């Protein structure tokens, strides 16, 4: 279609005056940061199973499928990196680990707890840190494996340490996320030519996702939300067979995944000329979004930015119709640290985070406007380039 062929997705979207945390990019630098933490905490070794943490540490693109099965494990000491997987992934790791990778890869046919205990014994490590998200069943099996080997051990929990490290993106990560968002922005332009009365929410979701795949996405950042009319009052609506009608809001919350990094964006459009009420709530959400962005900078408390959004919407009389947090971090996972929410947390330069206020009127409809971008020393630079102007679909 002519609309598709006219869309160009730039290879790079420059940021204006971005001052990032001074991080050396790449997996080797990330491992160095982990080892610095180990020295600080007197850990002999570290066990990692979370796939997002493993993707971040290994740099292996296109290997992790994030099924929740957790088929891999890393064992990191002060001078070695061991990675256990199985036959389904072994060749992929060999192909996709960076050429200078320090990882010793194996697919020994054994349970992961037994493998970890054997690595601890062979490397003479006794204080082995574990993720605090580890399943209780795995933890129990791990302790049993150490005890079956009559091996002295301590398993201190890391309390979100790797998640906090991942919150600050290096230049390599930022480039991948800019590419993911370029695909996502292009999809919005395409969808402006596809939304019309008579099409269902499910049809529009399929159109949206097919476009992203056809224009460079490796996957979806999450299951796309495409909803219309009164369904737009449900912030996490599931696309249905509802047919778009003239006068509807249509809300799209979606993102592309590119080399395992996510984008996230929401736009609300109107099919036909908006009513006075529709224009009122759209303008309020846009104003809230833009005022909050002005207040963001490195060192700000994310809670304060969230409170600002609730104040603006509350002062306009719609406080009861905005119940979610203002924003969340994005990276390998669609929800990462830090947050603009109800809990205090300091947002540092280099964090990539969404800004997504909304107003939702039950039985009527709702509006959300979401960009994501990087926090800088002095402000916030969005990766999102799509307009904030309310787009009206002719019909």
Image: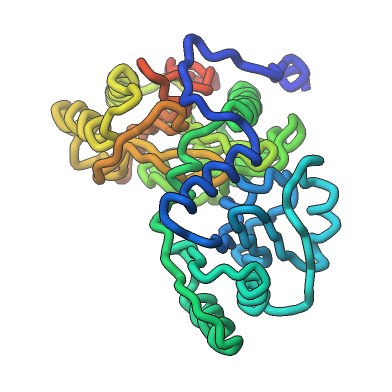
Q: Is residue 296 left or right of residue 161?
A: left
* Residue 297 showing in the rendered view: yes
Q: Which residue is located at x 42 percent, y 45 percent?
A: 231
Taking depth in this image into account, of 163 and 311 the one nearest to the observer is: 163
Q: Which residue is located at x 50 percent, y 32 percent?
A: 265
* Residue 248 showing in the rendered view: no
* Quadrant holding the N terminus: top right
Q: Which residue is located at x 54 percent, y 87 percent?
A: 147
Taking depth in this image into account, of 346 and 271 the one nearest to the observer is: 346
Q: Is residue 284 left or right of residue 216?
A: left
Q: Which residue is located at x 55 percent, y 78 percent?
A: 142
Report x, y in % for residue 352: 47, 32
Report x, y in % for residue 19: 46, 17
* Quadrant holding the C terminus: top right
Tell which residue pokes out farthest to the top in this image: 17
Does 207 appear above or below 83? above
Q: Is residue 16 left or right of residue 117?
A: left
């Amino acid at each position: 279609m002519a609309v598709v062929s006219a869309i160009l997705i730039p290879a790079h979207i420059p940021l204006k005056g971005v001052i990032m945390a001074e991080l050396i990019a790449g997996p080797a630098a990330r491992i160095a940061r982990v080892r610095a933490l180990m020295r600080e905490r007197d850990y002999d070794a570290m066990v990692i199973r979370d796939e997002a943490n493993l993707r971040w540490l290994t740099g292996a693109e296109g290997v992790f499928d994030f099924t929740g099965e957790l088929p891999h494990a890393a064992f990191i000491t002060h001078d070695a990196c061991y990675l256990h997987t199985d036959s389904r992934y072994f060749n992929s790791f060999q192909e996709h680990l960076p050429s200078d990778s320090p990882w010793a890869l194996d697919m020994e046919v054994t349970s992961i707890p037994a493998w970890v205990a054997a690595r601890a014994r062979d490397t003479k490590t006794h204080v082995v840190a574990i993720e605090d998200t580890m399943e209780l069943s795995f933890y129990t099996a791990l302790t049993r494996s150490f005890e079956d080997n009559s091996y002295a051990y301590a398993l201190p929990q890391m309390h979100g340490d790797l998640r906090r490290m991942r919150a600050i993106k290096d230049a390599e990560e930022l480039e991948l996320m800019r590419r993911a968002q370029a695909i996502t922005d292009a999809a919005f332009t395409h969808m402006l030519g596809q939304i019309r009365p008579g099409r269902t929410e499910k049809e529009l979701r399929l159109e949206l996702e097919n476009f992203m795949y056809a224009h460079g996405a490796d996957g979806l950042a999450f299951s796309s939300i495409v909803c219309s009319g009164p369904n737009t009052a449900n912030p996490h609506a599931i696309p249905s067979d509802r047919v778009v009608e003239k006068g509807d809001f249509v809300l799209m919350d979606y993102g592309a995944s590119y080399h395992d990094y996510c984008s996230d964006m929401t736009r609300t459009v109107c099919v036909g000329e908006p009513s006075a009420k529709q224009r009122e709530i759209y303008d309020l959400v846009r104003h809230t979004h833009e005022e909050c962005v002005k207040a963001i900078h490195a060192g700000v408390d994310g809670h304060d930015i969230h409170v600002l959004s609730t104040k603006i919407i509350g002062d306009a009389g719609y406080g009861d119709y905005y119940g979610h947090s203002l924003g969340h971090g994005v990276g390998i996972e669609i929800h990462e640290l830090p947050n603009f929410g109800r809990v205090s947390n300091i947002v540092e330069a280099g964090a990539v985070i969404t800004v997504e206020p909304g107003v939702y009127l039950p039985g009527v409809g709702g509006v959300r406007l979401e960009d994501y971008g990087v926090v800088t020393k002095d402000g916030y630079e969005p990766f999102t380039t799509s307009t904030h102007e309310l787009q009206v679909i002719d019909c």
